[in-house]
Every structure is written in C-alpha cells, then in structure tokens.
Image (cartoon, rainbow, N blue to C red):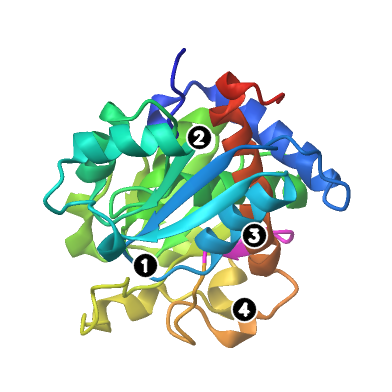
Amino acid sequence: MSVRHFINLGEFDAQTLKDILKNAHALKAQKYNPPQLFKGLSLAMMFDKRSTRTRMSFEIAMKQLGGHSMILNKDDIQLGGSESLESTARVMSRFVDAIMLRLSNHDMMEQLAKHADIPVINGMTDISHPCQIMADMMTIEEKLGGLEGKKIAWFGDYNNVTQSFVDASTKFDFEFVAALPEDLHGNADKGCTITADATAAASNADVIVTDTWVSMGQEGKTLDKFWPYQVNADLMAQANDNAIFMHCMPIHEWEEVTEEVAKSPESVIFDEAENRLHAQKAILAWCLEEAGVEV
C-alpha cells in the first residue's frame, strides 16, 4: 500500500492539487450534512507552537467527517527525546491512521514521514505552509472564479507562507509578485518576481496578501524596513477594482495591514480562515484514500 504524505506543494502534480481543491469545494457544500468519510479513523496532531486555525480546522474536520483526533504536545511524547524519530514514527503508525505535524523543524517532519507507514501532513514548518495555501487557493476560486492568469501580490517579509505561494504559482498558473525590503531579496525563491517597489507590485493585482512581520520566535525583530510594505488604502487602490485582501492570520494589529483594509469589504480573511476547515477535509480525504476513504 502506498503512503500519501502532504508535505511540500512542489512535490505534487498540478492535477492532484486541483482535484483536492475540487473536493474541498464539494465538502464545503455539504457543510451541514457532512459525509462520514472518516468513520473509525484517527488522526494524531502534534504541535510545538501555539495554534488556533490549524488545530481547530483539523480537529473539527476529523469530527465532522466521523473520525477522531488527539492532541500531542511535543513535550508530552518522545518526539526529539531519547527515542529515535524512526521508532516514534513506527509506533505511531500502529496506533493512528494519519499524523498532522505543526513543527518548526522541517527536517524532523521529513524524517518522520520517511519512516511512517501512514500519511504525514505538514500543518506548518519554518519552511512551508501548504495547507494554508490550499485554503487560500480555494478562497480565491470562490471570490474571483479561478486562479489561472491572476496576479497575486505579496508584501512584507519572506517566510514559509511566501514560499508556499511560490510553489503554488506554477501548479495553478498564476503570477506571483513579492514586494520585499531589498536585503531580503537574496533569500527569496527566484521562481517569482521580486521587487522593492510596493506600488508596482500592487498595480493591477487581483489579490493583495501579507502576513505578520514578526513570526513566533522572532520577538524583538526590528520593523523599520517593513513599513513601506504595509497594506493600506493607498496600496489597495493600485490593485484591480475587484481585488481582494488576504491574510492567513493572526494579524499584528495594525502593523502589516491597517484596520481600514482588514475590515473593508475587500477583506476575505474570515472566509479564508473558514476554508482551512474544508481544505483540511479534502487533504485528509486524499491522504487517507488508500485506507478506503472515498474521495
């Protein structure tokens, strides 16, 4: 039996990701009458950082579709302790049907997946955030009718979410432009357009997106260089008339985006947050298909 992990968007063919999104839309349409796809199945969820949307979306996704989930904090189990990652992965494979990890260390996740006999899902690492981007793609499809040919403009820091947008751009055929301080250009993936000019990046954009300038563990970081990349009304005015604003949340009020924009009709941040639930359902269904789940 093959094991379907969901770790890096770049490893998937475009059609597989599009099929997962199609199922996410279908499962959202069944929100109040969810099919019991995961009856008898269990998901272990492991965290080394605080989480609101990731924890709630995966836990509720399993419950709504008939399954069970359990929370495992890193300090509660042997992950990274005296037991090897291989042994941890093999033991967990005997107890549950899938593992969702939200870990800083991407290599640790890759090693667990290497030794696990069950799907491992990347809930977030310092390198990538594929589940968030699938929810974002779903939201853009809902609001703008599709992804192909759209211009998505990013502002501020270059982080795990930015990288996953770059990975998605080649799969869903959209243009991705990242407006960043010049000293961050060397760290950015050259698979996208990189500029220091925020106004140029926003020009004719269909989606304006940003994230916090200070991620967990980066407290005390200097913000001076990021202020020219704040998403405000003037920046939104450069985008297309029907452009939307997105943010994966939590927002640092009101740094990377002004309150005016975050609470404007163009803001779809709460639709985006809800879509984490439905995207997670579809990702789980794809990963667990080999366990008999009907996609």
Circle 4 SS class: helix
| Quadrant assignment for the C terminus | top right
Amino acid type, mark 3: Glu
Q: Residues within 10 Å of mark 4 (few under 14, many from 20)?
A: some
**Of residues 114 and 185, which is closer to you in this image?**
114
Marks 4 & 3, CB-CB < 8 Å contact: no
Mark in the foreground, 3 or 2? 2
Q: In this orientation, does residue 204 appear?
A: no
The answer to whether 60 is drawn above or below residue 293 in the figure is below
Marks 3 & 2, CB-CB < 8 Å contact: no
* Magenta extent: 239-248
Find the residue positioned furthest to the right: 33
Q: Residue at x 40, y 72 (%)?
A: 212
Q: Residues within 10 Å of mark 2 (few under 14, many from 20)?
A: many
Residue highlighted by disc 4:
261
Q: Residue 246 in magenta? A: yes
Residue highlighted by disc 1:
156
User: Residue 177 has which mark?
Assistant: none
Q: Quadrant of residue 226?
A: bottom left
Distance, label 3 to label 2, CA atoms, is 27 Å
Q: Residue at x 45, y 68 (%)?
A: 51
Residue highlighted by disc 2:
97
Q: Main secondary structure of the magenta part?
A: loop
Residue highlighted by disc 3:
272
Mark in the foreground, 4 or 2? 2
Q: In this orientation, does residue 119 appear?
A: yes
